[in-house]
Image: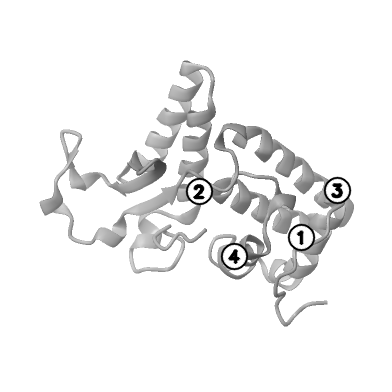
Amino acid sequence: MSDPNDGTEPNGDDVAELPADVVDEAERLTRLERTATDENEAAAHERRRDRLLAEHDFTARVRDDGGDDVLVLHPEEWHEDGVIRTERIENISRAIEIPLEGTGDPDNWEAVDDHNRDLVAAVRAQHGDVHGENAAALADFVGNHYAKPIESLTAAELAEFRTEYFVRNAWPSEKQRDAIDESIRLVYETAGEPVPEFQFSSSRR
């Protein structure tokens, strides 16, 4: 899935304005809100998301794009009495759009995320913190963008993580960067599944 405006690429003041980890957390809370069966729980997730965004003077709404819901994050200054005033929009690229209808089932997002986190914990316990941190970055990517088990990723989705998300969002250490290809193999080995065929980097071990 491509997120051309997800706030993860350096783009002047945009990165400082709404950091990538804030975008990811806003999406996570939105998914939890949507899947909560209790109204109070759903409202709590919404309040946490709104408070988080308010710290950066941003707000959120969910837009229906022909049946596919999209989470839209945009500057609070564009609003007046809850309505977006188009004359206040100087740079449309400041808005961040995140599709909520991934290839997985959003209704099962929380259970799927628990599964992926268990896999991360197993990798960390068996192979150490560097591989554990890389596995956690993969779980963040899968949970926020595809809402399905790590081992269900396609080759194209795994390549997206390796070449785009990991580089732009994970803020990896040098040890993590050097180990990422091995980490991916260890994640799948721990899950008992083959790694989808995709192009590893030239540092492949």
Which residue is at the front of the view, 50 or 84?
84
Relative horizontal placement of residue 191, taking residue 150 as reference (left or right): right
Circle on res. 176: none
| Local crowd size for mark 1, using a 10 Å CA cut-off: few (<14), some (14–19), many (≥20) | many
Relative horizontal placement of residue 160, taking residue 202 as reference (left or right): left
Name the amino acid type tagged 2: Asp
Residue underneath mark 3? 125
Q: Residue furthest front?
A: 66
Residue 177, horizontal then vertical, whole percent = 69, 70
Closer to the eye: label 2 or 3: 2
Residue underneath mark 2? 24
CA distance separating discs 2 and 1:
21 Å
First along the sequence among labels 2 and 1: 2
Circle on res. 160: 4
Name the amino acid type tagged 4: Glu
Residue 3, horizontal then vertical, whole percent = 45, 59
Numbered disc 1: secondary structure:
helix
Numbered disc 2: secondary structure:
helix
Closer to the eye: label 2 or 1: 2
Relative horizontal placement of residue 14, taking residue 167 as reference (left or right): left
Residue 26, horizontal then vertical, whole percent = 46, 42
Closer to the eye: label 2 or 4: 4
Q: Is residue 153 above or below residue 72?
A: below
CA distance separating discs 1 and 4:
20 Å
Residue 113 lies in what quarter of the image? top right
Q: Residue furthest left?
A: 87
First along the sequence among labels 4 and 3: 3
